[in-house]
Image (tube, grey):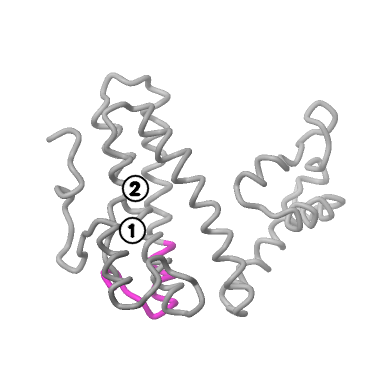
Amino acid sequence: MERLIAYDKLAREDRLVRMRAREVAQLKVDQGLPPFPDLLSRDSIKERVHGIMVGELQAMEGAGRTVYDFPDAPWEFTMDMARQVWDESRHVEIYVRLLEHLDGYIGEFPETTILWRCACAEDAAARVAGVNRGLEGLACDVFNQLVHIARKMGDPILERAVEFQESIDERFNLGGVRREGPHDAVPISIATEARREGGFTDEEIARLIRTTQRSAVY
């Protein structure tokens, strides 16, 4: 199998059209459209979700390629990349279903290649820095914005998902051992800073802290 596959060598079904991001942006500008989805309409949200789905697909492929491209890497690194393949595959499934929820379909918009280009760096550390730190960090910003907009639109699917998340937080507090406080003072300390880095808002963290007084699950 060839190593370090170029962006234009990825195997794809005919329904997906691969283009450079700047080409897509220019075509949209030529038609009087914003170069990046402005999220002011359902169609623009659908375009954003399609783009995220493509990114998850390329992240899955990139992690898999990293396992293959660097056979002499430390075992722990290889396992991390293999686990990421599994994680990204689930993310693809999630966004395919969200796309269908928006009455969209795979291939409705072009597939850009930004993430795959980062995933093709010749150095393993550069790949992790570019994809897992740079682009995944950007993804946290994008996901958080989508949640905010969907709430504003009153999307019933999202509202049910948020309610379910809150019920899980309330039920799985491990008899009250998970709570706010320093790591050496409480059994399980709520990782507020890590949650903020992961896209949790201060409001969500405060609500989680309020639920840690009791738990129905032990």
Question: Which residue matches tag 2?
Answer: 115
Look at the numbered disc 2 and give the secondary structure of its residue: helix
At label 2, the amino acid type is Leu
Question: Which residue matches tag 1?
Answer: 54
Q: Residue at x 48, y 80 (%)?
A: 41
Residue 11's disc is none
Query: Is residue 98 rendered magenta in the image?
Result: yes
Q: Which of marks 2 and 1 is in front?
A: 2
Residue 62 vertical placement versus 158 (above, below):
above
Q: Is residue 87 left or right of residue 190?
A: left
Q: Is residue 198 left or right of residue 135?
A: right
Look at the numbered disc 1 and give the secondary structure of its residue: helix
Q: Where is residue 3 in the image (x, y as percent from the top left)?
A: 17, 33
Q: Residue at x 44, y 76 (%)?
A: 101
Query: Is residue 154 rendered magenta in the image?
Result: no
Label 2 crowd bin: few (<14), some (14–19), many (20+), radius 10 Å: many
At label 1, the amino acid type is Val
Q: Where is residue 158 in the image (x, y as percent from the top left)?
A: 58, 71
The foreground one among 100 and 175 is 100
Q: In this view, does 123 lie to the left or right of 42?
A: left
Tell me which numbered mark, 2 or 1, is placed earlier along the sequence: 1
Q: Residue at x 38, y 53 (%)?
A: 56
In this figure, what is the number of numbered marks?
2
Q: Which residue is drawn at 51% across and 45% down?
A: 137
Q: Position of residue 208 (x, y in %)?
A: 77, 53
Q: Position of residue 192 (x, y in %)?
A: 73, 43
The foreground one among 16 and 217 is 16
Q: Where does the N terminus fall, quadrant-wise?
A: top left
* Residue range of the region highlighted in magenta in the rendering: 94-108
Disc 2 and disc 1 in contact, CB within 8 angstroms? yes
